[in-house]
């Protein structure tokens, strides 16, 4: 797959709440830098995602959407070896929202940084 393919698979996995799609997009040296729980590596990601989904459901106050996560203001740049993407994300029916930054190479998504604008404690 190309950098663009990996990046699209990654964002669609988050949009649909599909951990297996996200996993297919990740490079072996992937790190998810999450300020609430620390750095999560590829082998740790599925367990993290299960806990994250539980936290989302515990804090859902509105009706769920057909999408687990929605995105706005996607900005991308590719320097020929790394695709950088920035996006504003929201989880429908919850106060959860923030910004995400990804770095994707020909091996897959190598870095995902998340910042929370509004998030309940977990």
Image: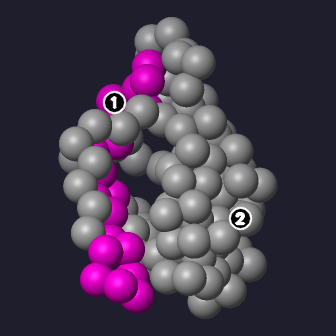
Figure check: 105 above or below 70: below
Query: What residue would you read off at disc 2?
Result: 23
Viewer can see residue 24: yes
* Frontmost residue, 31 versus 83: 83
Farthest top residue?
A: 63
What residue did someone put label 1 on?
A: 95
Residue 48 screen position, x and y as percent: 65, 61
4 vs 33, nearest the viewer = 4
- Residue at coordinates 55% horizontally, 26% vertically from top-left? 67
Question: Of the residues under marks 1 and 2, which one precedes in the sequence?
Answer: 2
Is the residue 40 above or below the residue 116 in the image?
below
Magenta span includes 56: no
What residue is shown at x 74% (from left), y 78% (from top)? 43
Q: Is residue 70 left or right of residue 24?
A: left
Say the numbered circle drawn on residue 83. Answer: none
Where is residue 78? Give x, y as percent: 31, 75
């Amino acid at each position: 797959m190309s950098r663009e393919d990996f990046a699209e698979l990654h964002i669609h996995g988050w949009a649909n709440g599909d951990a297996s799609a996200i996993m297919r997009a990740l490079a072996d040296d992937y790190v998810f830098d999450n300020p609430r729980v620390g750095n999560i590596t590829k082998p740790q990601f599925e367990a993290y995602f299960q806990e994250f989904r539980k936290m989302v459901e515990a804090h859902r106050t509105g009706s769920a959407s057909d999408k687990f996560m929605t995105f706005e203001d996607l900005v991308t740049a590719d320097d020929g070896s790394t695709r950088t993407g920035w996006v504003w994300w929201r989880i429908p029916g919850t106060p959860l929202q923030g910004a995400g930054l990804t770095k994707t190479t020909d091996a897959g998504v190598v870095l995902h940084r998340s910042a929370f604008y509004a998030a309940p404690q977990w």
